[in-house]
Image (spheres, rainbow, N blue to C red):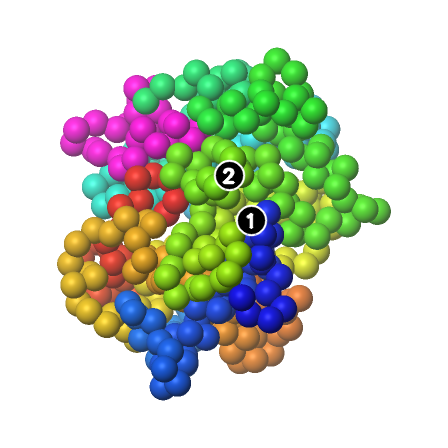
Amino acid sequence: MPEGDEDCTLPALLTPEAVRRRCNALLEIGLGEGLGGGLEHFAVNLNALEKATDLVEAVTRETYPDGQIPLHSRWRHFEFGDLDLWAQLSHALPGLDVHERARTRFDLAVGSVLLDAGAGPDWVYGDNATGLRMSRSEGLAIASFRMFAGGSLGGTPEAPKLDGASLAQLTVPELAAGFQVSPDNPLIGMENRVDILNRLGDALAARPDVFGNEGGRVGQLYDHLLERSRGGVLPAREILLALLELFGRIWPAGLQIGGLALGDIGRHSKLKRSDETDELVPFHKLSQWLAYSLVEPLWEAGIDVVDLDALTGLAEYRNGGLFLDTGVLELRSPDIAEEPLAVGSEPIVEWRALTVALLDRLADTLRQRLGQTKEELPLVKVLQGGAWTAGRRIAAEMRDGGAPPLQIQSGGAVF
């Protein structure tokens, strides 16, 4: 085990610091190729990082010419130009005090994020209310929003919420109807999506001390985080720690060791340790995406969420595709791109880890170019500005349908 390793126990992997350290450790191995190191599946070319940063900078300046970059969160997918779905819903729910409004936003964000794993290339959602036809993340966002607002995930249309009893009883046909899924409009991972929400319902019922009685409600997580704040201040990492503690068992493919639910953690043979964490690489992608998506409701409720950069970049295919398509990462064997790979396969674990570590380096360079500090341009804004959009754009230029450079068997539970 490396001297000073702070991640030598399994619980220590349930932190953003462990994600950053372990991903950076794999990047350092990749950069040590000339010293007898190197990785098996990808070569790292830091000289190409300038090209990746050029693209991210151009997209950021084009999209946000005034420099006012919002957070990379689920709320952006409820916004379509002048149309703001959440604003419409909140106006239709009068009389909510500041705390109940925050609980409702938590309900919506959690349900929508947990349904946000990749939709696949063939699914489209047609929104009758707006006439929009959207695919991928935006389509998933509108579909989940409509189900939530209609009371299909709990509560009523007059008072929608995400409650444990409704989630535990949700069926595949019910979700398929809400998401307009059919043989001609297939959405990948339907069973896993429902399984996650069913498991979430069970998780709420298992913790009445946090989520309340009668099956519990997701929105009570707001009250729990309020209690974890000090003087109205809440470090961003506390949001993630709470999510990993309370929702750790909801992931169908999540790693479990010795009864401890570890969630989105992969294995890599190069990350050798002499303890129980040997070869383990944490990512917690959807949990971090959810943590980012809970910041704005907390801000609106008067809670000062600080130290956003304690969270990491998201280990998903748009960010990872950016580095592959700009040549920062190079496949050692073209065979990797030929067949769909499981999320837990070593090439995908390696790709995800390198993505997280490289996002930190890209962010540092971008801040220098834009003349901003970490506080002014935290990583969550770099992603929004940013890296995620640039990854999607270059994918659309290089491949039909904007598919990612690698094929992933996501199953609707991770990506």
> Which of the 4 image quarters holds residue 316?
bottom left
Report if residue 409 is visible in the image: yes
> Which of the 4 image quarters holds residue 162?
top right
The spot of residue 315 in percent (x, y) is: 43, 56
Disc 2 residue type?
Gly
The spot of residue 204 in percent (x, y) is: 57, 25
Number of numbered tags placed on the structure image: 2
Q: Compute the Cα span from label 1 to label 2.
A: 10 Å
Q: At 70% from the left edge and 56% from the top edge, which residue is drawn?
A: 306
Query: Is tag 1's residue or tag 2's residue first in the polypeptide sequence?
Result: 1
Q: Nearer the viewer, residue 93 or 299?
A: 299
Q: Secondary structure at mark 2?
A: loop
Q: At 24% from the left edge and 52% from the top edge, which residue is drawn?
A: 341
Residue 409 shown in magenta:
no
Q: Nearer the viewer, residue 369 or 194?
A: 194
Left or right of 175, for residue 312: right
Q: Secondary structure at mark 1?
A: loop
> Which of the 4 image quarters holds residue 298?
top right
Magenta region: which residues?
173-197
Extreme residue toward the top, this view: 214
Assess whether mark 2 and mark 1 are in contact (beta carbons under 8 angstroms): yes
The spot of residue 47 in percent (x, y) is: 38, 84
Question: Residue 258's mark?
Answer: 2
Q: At 17% from the left edge and 29% from the top edge, which residue is drawn?
A: 183
Near mark 2 (Cα within 10 A), the count class, few <14, some 14-19 or many ≥20, is few
Q: Quadrant of the N terminus?
A: bottom right
Disc 1 residue type?
Leu
The spot of residue 148 in percent (x, y) is: 48, 26
Q: At 26% from the left edge and 28% from the top edge, which residue is drawn?
A: 181
- Viewer-nearest of labels 1 and 2? 2
Q: Nearer the viewer, residue 354 or 405?
A: 354
Residue that badge 1 annotates: 10
